[in-house]
């Protein structure tokens, strides 16, 4: 789009980030000097705290194995637990809705808002909501959307997209947030002081909590044997979102099921420690059905929208492991790529390693085939994953599909084909390596090569050492010949 | 029951027949590492051969999703190393690739069997020396301070972490300064570093700064790909850190030229 302003072209704000090529999104991220500061502040802290929490928990490895098997069991028996959950939710007085796509899910939510005559809705942070595009859908329907999570509030003020699944405003430094609050809040308090900034947001949001007609939340767990849902937050905004308005709508992916409360407890301990290093979130709330006769508060209507949006496809097409994901964000906090480019460059609702596995499902592999490639396969994401998702293996699975479907650049295909042909013919290969060594040495000055044709990806940023005059094989064979002669 | 040390098992003699898998990078860029490996293996009582038909392990194809080519190269490696007690590789990444061969042949029972047999006999050099041969360097002196980077495949896939440190502690005069983020990827990632050069550069730049901040004379590691990445960046930044493969130091080649220094 030639008419788009540069602001609208930024991957933080574009309505379709995939319209900007991946290379440009990377460049934009790497050129942004405050982004790296912001990423380091949050992810370094998160990594240190997670490491301390895991070290202080002797049963971590055991809990991880148990958590993994609980999630895997549910994924293997989704049909059973979905039916059980629905029956118990209905019994508690909730209404249950089923959506197979993101559009269906949004349409159900909009319809419920309209029926409730909603002018203003409050939202508690939900990644599923981001995944299905609910913020946009609400705006398109003319319904005022109030983001109540502090970070989502920042994101909404800045017209950004979230850049992390736990800290949506991770890409903004506190200095930038102070500026935003000064410009947008009616009575901004002292912007140099974090507590004062939080107080400013609290004041701004308090009236909107009270005025909302509908509250929308996600769910961290759907508990099959009671029909309850569980939300975890650190700000208490989910409680104000779900308790005050007349109608509470929950949108949740079908993989959020657990058999019972005790299973949820195992996963909660893993989730919170992996996400923030705390033992438990400040608020862990179980919501079961609407307000009952005699209850002092609670919503009159309680709707649960169960969303598939590609999950059945993931289960059937080799990505079942991914459905164990608890959305803790540890994989991205430990990812060397995420920690350089941040969340927006990924383009999808979910960034980092878990995002690179799921985005091709939501947005199509053709648009997002770079994501599984832009990974060093170093394995630290799987190492810190609280449910042992084999993220590198799943990412390589997408690479296999990309290769089969011809999505990788011709130059990559040809170079690999050429290399593989040589390597299948050892005699030719060893002639080739001898020639390569001699050729490369021509470009060296001192012990180093500063620029090498066909290898600018390397030499643009680093030097390459001058190879030894002869290959190992040449040298070794000569030594053997001399030995044989005696 | 205590495990029987592998070299005491009846199928493997006290002097095992070991094949060195040289790896492409060592063959082409730094043959000294191959000779260092042979010297260490011989000191550790192995009978070392270098099969001539070895080429690439197929990792670039495998990691690009090109399984057909990866399988073809894997067959070549399996054939080349069929008749040895152990296969030893001075790289966790290439040894790790051989350990993944069974995944490539999951639908081919004949080759699956051969792939599993090779994987079971294949070791990364530094862990092989300590875990299987119980080797420690003797009478090697090097007066220097060094810091150590753990390459990801060796560390996470093969559990290489304590072994090199144990052996380096036996070098007289060598002090080890811990590297903050020693277990964080250097940004090499094989083809990743040329497919996404800007990201790779940002990662290795951060790594180079961490290395420089240790003020160590030497950077050591066990995988030439990662070492080339870090050495190349350190040199471009004008750092004085000298970079060696751990095997070079252990075999006494540490008095020779570091990566990028002329003979």
Image (spheres, rainbow, N blue to C red):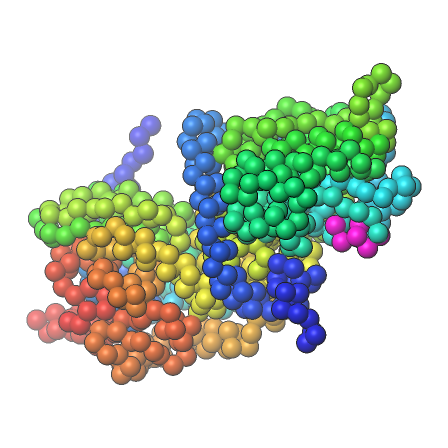
| Viewer-closest of A382 and B135 | A382
Q: Is residue B256 left or right of residue A427?
A: left
Horizontal and vertical percent position of residue A31: 49, 64
Horizontal and vertical percent position of residue A155: 64, 50
Up the image or down, A202 lies above or below A180; here it is above
| Residue plotted at (11% across, 52% down) | B143
| Viewer-closest of A252 and A63 | A252
| Residue plotted at (17% across, 50% down) | B145
Magenta-drawn segment? A135-141
In the picture, which quadrant includes the N terminus of chain A? Answer: bottom right
| Residue plotted at (84% across, 32% down) | A246
Q: Main secondary structure of the magenta part?
A: helix
Residue B108 visible, this angle: no
Q: Is residue B22 left or right of residue A47?
A: left
| Viewer-closest of A51 and B57 | A51
On the image, which quarter does residue B188 sit in?
Answer: bottom left
| Residue plotted at (83% across, 34% down) | A247
On the image, which quarter does residue B73 sit in?
Answer: bottom left
Up the image or down, A152 lies above or below B68; here it is above
Horizontal and vertical percent position of residue B41: 20, 54
């Amino acid at each position: 789009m030639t008419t788009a302003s540069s602001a609208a072209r930024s991957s933080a704000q574009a309505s379709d980030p995939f319209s900007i090529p991946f290379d440009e999104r990377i460049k934009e991220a790497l050129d942004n000097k405050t982004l790296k500061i912001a990423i380091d502040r949050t992810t370094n802290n998160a990594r240190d705290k997670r490491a301390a929490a895991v070290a202080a928990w002797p049963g971590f490895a055991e809990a991880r194995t148990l958590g993994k098997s609980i999630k895997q069991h549910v994924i293997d028996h989704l049909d059973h637990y979905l039916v059980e959950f629905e029956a118990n939710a209905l019994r508690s007085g909730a209404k249950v809705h089923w959506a197979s796509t993101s559009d269906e899910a949004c349409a159900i939510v909009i319809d419920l808002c309209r029926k409730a005559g909603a002018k203003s809705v409050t939202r508690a942070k939900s990644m599923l909501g981001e995944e299905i595009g609910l913020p946009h859908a609400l705006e398109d329907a003319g319904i005022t959307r109030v983001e109540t999570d502090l970070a989502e509030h920042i994101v909404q003020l800045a017209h950004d997209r979230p850049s992390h699944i736990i800290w949506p405003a991770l890409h903004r430094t506190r200095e930038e947030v102070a500026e935003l609050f000064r410009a947008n809040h009616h009575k901004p308090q002292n912007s140099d002081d974090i507590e004062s900034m939080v107080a400013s947001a609290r004041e701004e949001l308090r009236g909107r909590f009270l005025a909302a007609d509908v509250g929308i939340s996600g769910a961290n767990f759907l508990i099959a044997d009671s029909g309850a849902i569980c939300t975890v937050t650190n700000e208490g905004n989910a409680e104000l979102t779900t308790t005050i308005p007349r109608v509470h709508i929950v949108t949740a992916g079908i993989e959020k099921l657990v058999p019972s409360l005790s299973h949820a407890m195992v996963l909660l301990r893993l989730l919170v420690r992996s996400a923030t290093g705390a033992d438990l979130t400040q608020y862990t709330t179980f919501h079961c059905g609407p307000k009952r006769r005699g209850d002092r508060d609670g919503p009159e209507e309680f709707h649960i929208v169960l969303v598939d949006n590609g999950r059945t496809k993931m289960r059937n097409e080799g990505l079942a492991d991914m459905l164990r994901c608890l959305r803790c964000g540890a994989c991205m906090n430990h990812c060397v790529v995420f920690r350089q480019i941040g969340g927006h460059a990924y383009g999808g609702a979910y960034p980092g390693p878990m995002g690179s596995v799921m985005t091709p499902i939501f947005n199509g592999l053709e648009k997002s085939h770079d994501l599984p490639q832009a990974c060093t396969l170093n394995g630290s994401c799987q190492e810190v994953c609280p449910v042992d998702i084999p993220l590198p293996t799943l990412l390589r699975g997408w690479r296999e599909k990309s290769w089969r479907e011809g999505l990788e650049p011709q130059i990559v295909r040809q170079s690999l084909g050429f290399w593989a042909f040589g390597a299948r013919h050892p005699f030719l290969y060893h002639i080739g390596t001898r020639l390569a060594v001699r050729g490369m040495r021509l470009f060296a000055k001192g012990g180093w090569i500063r620029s090498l044709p066909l290898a600018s990806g390397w030499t643009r940023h680093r030097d390459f050492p001058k190879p030894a005059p002869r290959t190992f094989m040449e040298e070794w064979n000569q030594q053997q010949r001399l030995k044989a002669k005696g | 029951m205590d495990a029987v040390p592998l070299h005491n098992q009846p199928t493997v003699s006290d002097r095992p027949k070991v094949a060195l898998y040289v790896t492409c990078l060592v063959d082409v860029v730094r043959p000294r590492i191959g000779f260092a490996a042979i010297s260490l293996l011989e000191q550790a009582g192995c009978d070392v051969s270098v099969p001539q038909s070895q080429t690439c392990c197929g990792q670039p194809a495998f990691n690009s999703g090109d399984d057909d080519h990866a399988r073809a190269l894997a067959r070549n490696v399996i054939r080349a190393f069929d008749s040895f007690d152990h296969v030893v590789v001075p790289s966790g990444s290439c040894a790790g690739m051989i350990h993944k061969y069974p995944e490539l042949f999951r639908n081919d029972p004949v080759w699956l069997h051969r792939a599993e047999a090779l994987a079971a006999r294949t070791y990364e050099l530094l862990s092989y020396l300590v875990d299987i041969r119980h080797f420690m360097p003797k009478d090697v002196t090097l007066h220097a301070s060094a810091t150590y980077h753990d390459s990801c495949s060796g560390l996470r896939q093969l559990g290489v972490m304590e072994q090199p440190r144990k052996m380096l502690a036996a070098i007289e005069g060598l002090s080890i300064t811990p590297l903050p983020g020693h277990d964080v990827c250097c940004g090499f990632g094989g083809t990743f570093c040329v497919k996404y050069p800007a990201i790779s550069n940002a990662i290795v730049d951060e790594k180079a700064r961490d290395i420089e901040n240790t003020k160590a004379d030497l950077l050591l590691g066990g995988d030439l790909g990662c070492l080339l990445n870090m050495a190349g960046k350190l040199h471009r930044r004008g750092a004085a850190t000298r970079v060696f493969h751990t095997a070079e130091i252990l075999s006494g080649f540490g008095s020779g030229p570091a990566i990028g220094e002329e003979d």
